[in-house]
Image: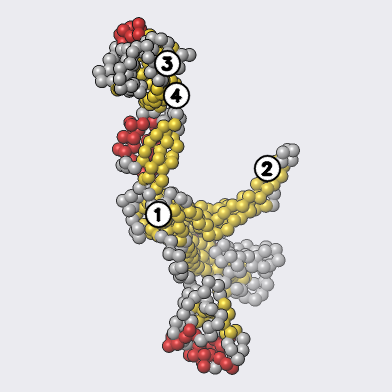
Amino acid sequence: MARRIGLRQVITSIAAFGVLVSAPLEFGFMAPAQAQSQDAAPRAKLLRVRLANNKSQALRLDYPFTDVLVGSAEIADVIPLSDQTLYILGKKTGTTNVSILDNSRRVIGVVDVEVGPDIGSVSEKISAGAGTTGIQVRSNGDQLVLEGTAADAVTVDKAVEIAKALAPGGVVNATRVASPQQVMLKVRFIEVNRSAGRELGIRYDYLGRRTDAFIGQGGRDTEGNLLPTLLSGSVPFAHVLSRFANNSRMLDVHIDALEAKGLVRRLAEPNLVAMSGGTATFHAGGKIPIPVASTTQAGIPTITVQMEPFGVRLNFTPTVLSNGLINLDLAPEVSDIDESIAVRSSGISIPGISVRSARTSVELRDGQSFAMAGLLQNTTERNLEQLPWLGSIPVLGALFRSTEFQSRETELVVIVTPHLVKPGKPGDLVATPLDTTLPANDADLFLTGKLEVEKPGDPSAASPTQEWILANREKIKGPYGHILTSPDVVPVAAVRSASTKPNVVRAKN
């Protein structure tokens, strides 16, 4: 509701407000150069005033007024200080207007008042907190709009965080990064899995019975077949004595002696490129189907299949800072199918997945490397099986017991190296692993057994086979090479330029 304020309320309003502005701002209303009489009404003038919440401004007019009408007293409070001075106080975010009337009840001016966040204070805090002066702040109602250019994405993020704390209506980010950078990340996943096992046991078979008593991991099934051991996974190769005497009524003694060593190495070297502030992902491995129980909309139970990934995975987000540092947010993960933690239900075996993952943030310069997620895991197992009482006899008890020792050691290291990269110029050729080699022709394949040969750049670099082909090319029919050159070039000496698509070069008859 509009509120009307007359000059008779000036003294009362000033006393209630308790503050006088000593230096009000002066705003003219297009007064003519010559003096006018009091009866001549000046043309109404539109003024615009922007105020921060709980801050004020004084306006001085060129003509005296008698009444003031405020559109919304909840947004702004207007106090006449004199017949030519107004005091406007911003109370709440929003817009309103103030109509100024003279003694003849004519409108001599209108002031549009906009009350919003304190832009000056926000700009100062952004400059101090983010360390930049290239970001401008303006308001849109109770929202703050950030514009301008920042040195890097980190500066923009800091500015947005500061603005969000001061803007009740949110922040609109319209800033730009001065020079977006591209970051190539070279990652090496190195995993070493070492295992060692030893087994020594003695097994006895008496009278050739198929339900033998035995010591150790060896044995026979109901068909008389040898059972595999835990270490070998097949018929044990360590039966140094398969039968003591070839007589079904004699005692058969099997000595199981096994020593196993294993070494498994896995290496993945992904090279990923991402924009500063963007995210790149890498996955080398596969997906296994996992049955998942669910119900349909009709309440009927059903089983769906969910594909679960495994292998080597990497997510990284680079951010190039203004001081040349590269901020990296890394999340590597290495997972394997593990049957030892499988879940079996209703005859269905669902394999488990062992996962080793890490997440970290680091700052490096171009070309610097660091190692992370170095995981060393040692597992030692000792199993002892023996016949009661007999296996506890000193010295002779070794004939009646089986001992197994197994040790596993797994180590995982992730080495990361970032590089700042730029795209090549238009027309520049990008090197590939096929630039220096060619598929072998028939002569190289059948005479020398080579699958590929080096690509010569001049006749002196040609191999003896290639020189013979060049000298006798008129006697050869059919294709003799796969060269990235124009189709009309036959001599190897003329192979200079590369074309955009492969062409088969044929010899002339």
| Mark 2 secondary-structure assignment | strand
Residue 94 is marked as 4
Dots 4 and 1: beta carbons under 8 Å?
A: no
Say which of marks 3 and 1 sits in front. Answer: 3
Q: Is residue 176 left or right of residue 299?
A: left
Q: Which amino acid type is shown beneath numbered disc 2?
A: Ser
Crowding around mark 4 (Cα neighbors within 10 Å: few <14, some 14 to 19, many 20+) is: some
Compute the Cα span from label 3 to label 1.
Answer: 58 Å
Q: Which amino acid type is shown beneath numbered disc 1?
A: Gln
Q: Which amino acid type is shown beneath numbered disc 3?
A: Val
In x, y percent, where is residue 346?
A: 69, 49
Q: Circle 2 is placed at which residue position?
A: 294
Dots 3 and 4: beta carbons under 8 Å?
A: no
Compute the Cα span from label 4 to label 2.
Answer: 52 Å
Dots 4 and 2: beta carbons under 8 Å?
A: no
Residue 181 is marked as 1
What residue is drawn where x is 42% and y is 58%?
184
Nearer the observer, 215 or 327: 327
Camera sees residue 288: yes
